[in-house]
Image (spheres, rainbow, N blue to C red):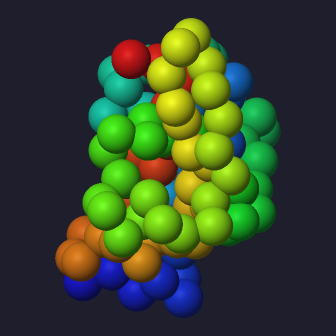
Amino acid sequence: MLDRSKVKLFKMNDCDWVAAESEEQAHEWYLKETGISEEESPFEDIKEESIEKCFLCPFSELTPEEKNMNFVITERHGEKWVWLPFSYTLTTIPSMETPFMAGSTEY
């Protein structure tokens, strides 16, 4: 079960963020999950980010209730997107264990 009080957000590189309880846990999981080497993703490059960091999410993926919340909406490439804080995202995950991929700019 996810203990939200222990979850931190770590920026692994320019593309990926991992939710974990520690930098070490985030790094070990990230290397295993992505298959990249320590040289490609050195431990020293990991940075803890604010739990309030926002990620873009397609507006179409929001629930009707979320669409009426006060999230910042933007338009990109002709589509509506919403800025969701990671702290809010944690409240929507019923049960998950850390670490996990919290956000990515790679599709």
Would you identify the image quadrant in which residue 63 lies?
bottom left
Relative to 57, does residue 85 appear above or below in the rendering?
A: below
Say which residue appears at 76% left-offset and 34% top-offset: 45
Q: Is residue 77 above or below residue 69?
A: above
**Residue 93 screen position, x and y as percent:** 30, 70
Q: Nearer the viewer, residue 12 or 89?
A: 89
Visible residue check, residue 18: yes
**In the image, residue 89 above or below residue 94:** above
Q: Is residue 26 left or right of residue 12?
A: left
Name the residue located 57 percent from the left edge and 55 percent from the top edge.
84
Judged left or right of residue 63, residue 27 is right
Instruction: Specify the quadrant that holds the C terminus.
Output: top left
- Point out the image quarter for the N terminus: bottom left
In the image, what residue occupies the spot 71% across and 65% down?
52
Can you give x and y, in whole percent of width and height, for residue 66 in the image?
42, 65
Q: Would residue 82 appear left or right of 42 to someone viewing this image?
A: left
Nearer the observer, 70 or 1 = 70
Q: Position of residue 71 (x, y in %)?
A: 62, 59
**x%, y% of residue 36?**
44, 19
Query: Which residue: 44% across, 59% down?
Result: 67
The answer to which image quadrant residue 105 occupies is top right
